[in-house]
Amino acid sequence: MSTFRVKMNTIQSTYQPSLTLSYIVNEPENKIFDRKSSRIKPGDLAPIISAFANAEGGTIVIGIDDKTKAIEGLSALTPDQVNDLVSAPKDTCIPMPQYHEEILAVTNKRGEADRLLLLHIEPSHEQIIRTVKNSTYLRVADRTKKR
């Protein structure tokens, strides 16, 4: 068990080093961090992307079950589906927020090598980021609120 704990702490974001695998799996969602299942549709990410961009920014981790926190990974997705998730900020928000994508190598709940997708959304200081459905969101604590 302690070996797994060490491994979880050595897997971390290079863009946001405080995001270790242990943090991603165990910590509650908050003002700058959210986790989503790999089954999420890219369009369903729009409110969260808008909310992070219109607040202090934040990271969406895709490939973790929202409820159970189990590591699903991205291996069940096609390359096109992964690309659609990576492109979600550009395809679902107007104007496109500044963001960085990152892939973390992990072991999924079945013990197989897999990956997580991290979308690091930058705060937008000069313009409001809306969804393509013309809605605006803001991140308040661990909630995405429509404005």
Image (spheres, grey):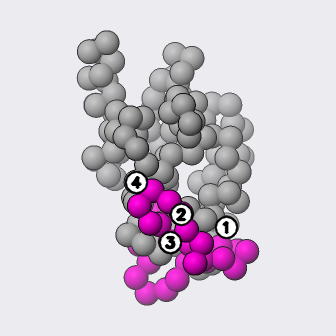
Mark 4–mark 1 CB contact (< 8 Å): no
- Mark 4 / mark 2, whichever is N-terminal: 4
> Residue drawn at (66%, 76%), measured in percent from left and top?
135
Using residue 95 as the reference point, say whether residue 14 is left or right of it: left
Q: Which residue is mark 3?
A: 138
- Where is 1 relative to 68, above or below? above
- Give 74 or 44, whichever is nearer the viewer: 44
Can see residue 88? Answer: yes
Amino acid type of the residue that numbered disc 1 sits on in the rendered structure: Thr
Displayed quadrant of residue 105: top left
Q: Is residue 126 magenta?
A: yes
Q: Position of residue 55 (x, y in %)?
A: 42, 72
How many neighbours does mark 4 have within 10 angstroms: few (below 14), some (14-19), or many (20 or more)?
Answer: some
What element does badge 1 sit on?
Answer: helix
Q: Which residue is mark 2?
A: 144
Q: Which residue is mark 4?
A: 30
Write down the region rendered in magenta: 120-147
> Residue drawn at (52%, 83%), measured in percent from left and top?
128
Instruction: Measure the C-alpha gap from mark 2 to mark 1.
Output: 16 Å
> Residue drawn at (45%, 56%), measured in percent from left and top?
142
Q: Which residue is mark 1?
A: 92
